[in-house]
Amino acid sequence: MSATLTNLAVSLFSEIMTADQLARDRLGKLLPKGMEISHFSLLNHLTHSSEEKTPAQLAKSFHVTRGAMSNTLSRLEVSGYIHIRPDWDDARRKLVTISPAGRQARDRALTAISPLIDTVVADLGEAKVRAAIPVLRDLRQKLEQ
């Protein structure tokens, strides 16, 4: 790889990591008390899922360890935001669904962060955001391989 291409790659990853850090910081401050980014992300994921998920499936989807996912699931279950039940077909597995309280918590969090994300998207412009999404998606898919 040429030095120019290496510098380009380093700049790209530096911008992505800095933007991620800033977004997490800003959004984390806006979320309802006691809710973390990981909680919101998981509740948002479950809101859009029509079927129950295993903790292992969720850990894979979020690219975290099973232990990290177990910790997040435990906290959400204690809060009453999710239901975890045994898999009746395989007693070794558990199945996770979002509860009505979890949907409400996700909706409250989305209401809290929407002004910031709406402003950022408006400031960048719809065309830039639409153009960035496929590039970021391709990057994510390359990194998943």
Image (tube, rainbow, N blue to C red):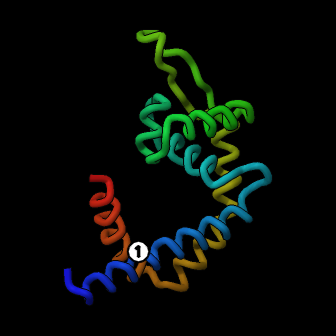
Q: Looking at the picture, does residue 43 appear above or below residue 36?
A: above
Give the image location of residue 5, x and y in percent: 25, 84
Q: Quadrant of the N terminus?
A: bottom left
**In screen coordinates, is 14 left or right of 141?**
right
For image coordinates 58% across by 73% down, the residue present is 118
- Residue 108 seen in the current view: yes
The residue lying at 47 percent from left, 14 percent from top is: 92
- Please provide percent x and percent y for residue 6: 29, 82
Percent of width and height locating residue 100: 66, 34
Q: In front here: 123 or 84?
A: 84
Question: In the rendered view, does 23 fall on the left or right side of 14?
Answer: right
Q: What SS does tag 1 mark?
A: helix
Residue identified by numbered label 1: 13
Residue at horizontal 40 percent and vertical 83 percent from the top: 11
Classify 10 Å Cα crowding around label 1: few (below 14), some (14-19), many (20 and above): few
Q: Is residue 48 above or below residue 36?
A: above
How many marks the image carries: the answer is: 1
Residue that lies at the very extreme toward the bottom in this rendered image: 4
* Disc 1 residue type (three-letter): Phe
The correct choice, above or below, for 104 with respect to 27 in the image is: above
The residue under the point 26% across, 89% down is 4
Measuring from the top left, give residue 121's x and y in whole percent.
Answer: 52, 77
Residue furthest left in the image: 1
Q: Is residue 100 visible?
A: no
Which residue is farthest right? 33
Q: Quadrant of residue 83?
A: top right
Q: Nearer the viewer, residue 27 or 97?
A: 27
